[in-house]
Image (spheres, rainbow, N blue to C red):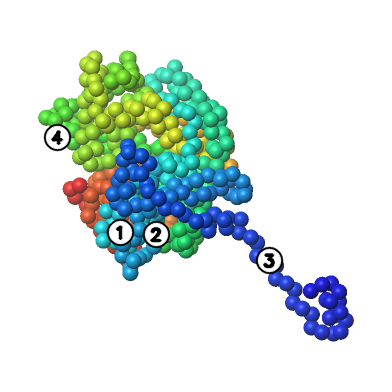
Amino acid sequence: MTALSLAAALTLGAAPAAPAAPAAPADPLARYHHQHLTWKSCLLGPDDETGKELEQAGARCTEVTVPLDYARPDGRTITVALSRIRATDSAHRVGTLVLNSGGPGGPTIGDPPWVRKAMKDVGGRYDVVGVDPRFVGRSTALDCGWPTGSMIRGAGRDRAEFDGMVAFSADLARRCRTHAGDLVPYANTRNTARDMDVIRAALGERRISYLGYSYGSYLGEVYTTMFPGRTDRVVLDGVIDPARYGPRLLRGTEAAGKHALRDWADWAAAHDEDYGLGRTGSAVLATVEEIQSAAERAPLRVGGYRVDDRITPTLVLNGLSQDLPSAYGDFAQGVRELRRAAGGEPVSPSPWLAGLLQFLLTGHDSAYGSAQTAILCGDGTAPRDPETYWRDLRQADPRDRFFAPVTNAINPYAFWGPPRERPTTVRADLPALLVNATGDPRTLYSGAERVHRGWPGSRLITLHDADQHAVFGIFGSACVDDAVNAYLATDRLPAVDLSCPRGRP
């Protein structure tokens, strides 16, 4: 209606026309939510073992386009890679189950086959989707050109070695500014959660179910807070207390680490005829201490690697997250080889130790460590003054040569820029199924209890007497697996919290 006609209508005493309703604001993400997905083979080449496993499981892969910066959705874009195994029971299909296996920085695209197997019969009722989060795995990479796959090291035995770690950490941060400065500001969990919602919409789902392990539990907490009403069934395994999440997340885990080390030592003693590390738990622990003492005197030669006293605590930390005979055996074999190296013998490392040394002492997995650090630094702050870390180390238990030197060590966080966003204040309540082992050396059971107390609508499944990080489908507890699958099948949380005995993995 023109201005003239409106004036005429008013003059004639006619009822005025209703004002036009304001136009609904255009959805700035509409082109991302409605993008066409082209599903293709997951196999990248003849040596792609992940691709082969996905192909054998019937998975297909695709990429979703997302904004680099959600504040500027019309600007630069990046891609996020995902895999999917379609539901086979279409008559009883529940929907899509999105996975995250942790890290941060851990690729998840290869996980649908084993998760689908762990889900047993209920797996056929879901499209099971694995996602490599932004800057991880097959998604657009963030690679700082590091000479290592991890910034995690022990702090060393004296001020000179600590100062070396200060220089090492500052150099890692500088490399990220130099080689990935255009991407680093956009690496954080809030953007990963936004990407998840783009994936949800692009898959044509009103709501998604979610299974997150370790850091993936925090991602689930953030997603459900930022996008309420867009999740169906939520399982968080290895639960992170959001109040404790941040760049120094490992602080406070020292006692759990020492407990796991003692339990492993008892296991190794019971298998002394296989590994020869000592006939008692105390003797095995003494062997580990002797290795550390030797590494303090001079770096150990293991194959083509030189392993000093800042690397050995990281090897111990990595050897103690799975309370399973296979993982215990790998670690015991690695310790056996380190003891031989400490005695001056030539050593060709076994696959577990060789892989870990390659990860820590070469740039082979630079992208992994780069993305992990960028996400942690993008999610929170850490002290900037190196003297803070030195004081923390001085105040730590001097008898602890393996855990406190890692959890209190300086890292690139001290030399990072401030996050672009504040951390998410996670909702006070969330209907979810929580899973945690009492001896988890990474995500402490006490943290899972705190989260559960703050979420009256949640239920907690406790696996007792296991030093296990991540349980469902991994540890082999029928009690845990059956309870999780019952929830995924029915959408009914257990009436009460559940306690599961360790049993025999």
Q: Could you say where residue 449 lies in the image, as x and y percent from the top left?
A: 37, 51
Looking at the picture, which amino acid does disc 3 mark? Answer: Ala
Classify 10 Å Cα crowding around label 3: few (below 14), some (14-19), many (20 and above). few
Badge 2 is on which residue? 96
Looking at the picture, which amino acid does disc 2 mark? Answer: Thr
Query: Residue 232 appears in which quarter of the rendering?
Result: bottom left
First in residue order: circle 3 vs circle 2: 3
First in residue order: circle 2 vs circle 4: 2
First in residue order: circle 1 vs circle 3: 3
Task: Give the structural element (helix, strand or loop) at label 4.
Answer: helix
- Is residue 72 among what the camera can see? yes
Badge 4 is on which residue? 270
Distance between the alpha carbons at the discs numbered 3 and 4: 73 Å
First in residue order: circle 2 vs circle 1: 2
The label number, if any, that marks residue 23 in the structure image: 3
Query: Is the C-beta separation of discs 1 and 3 under 8 Å?
Result: no
Q: Could you say where residue 358 lies in the image, as x and y percent from the top left?
A: 34, 27
Q: Could you say where residue 3 lies in the image, as x and y percent from the top left?
A: 84, 72
Q: Nearer the viewer, residue 206 or 478?
A: 206
Classify 10 Å Cα crowding around label 4: few (below 14), some (14-19), many (20 and above). some
Distance between the alpha carbons at the discs numbered 3 and 2: 33 Å
Distance between the alpha carbons at the discs numbered 1 and 3: 44 Å
- Is residue 434 among what the camera can see? no
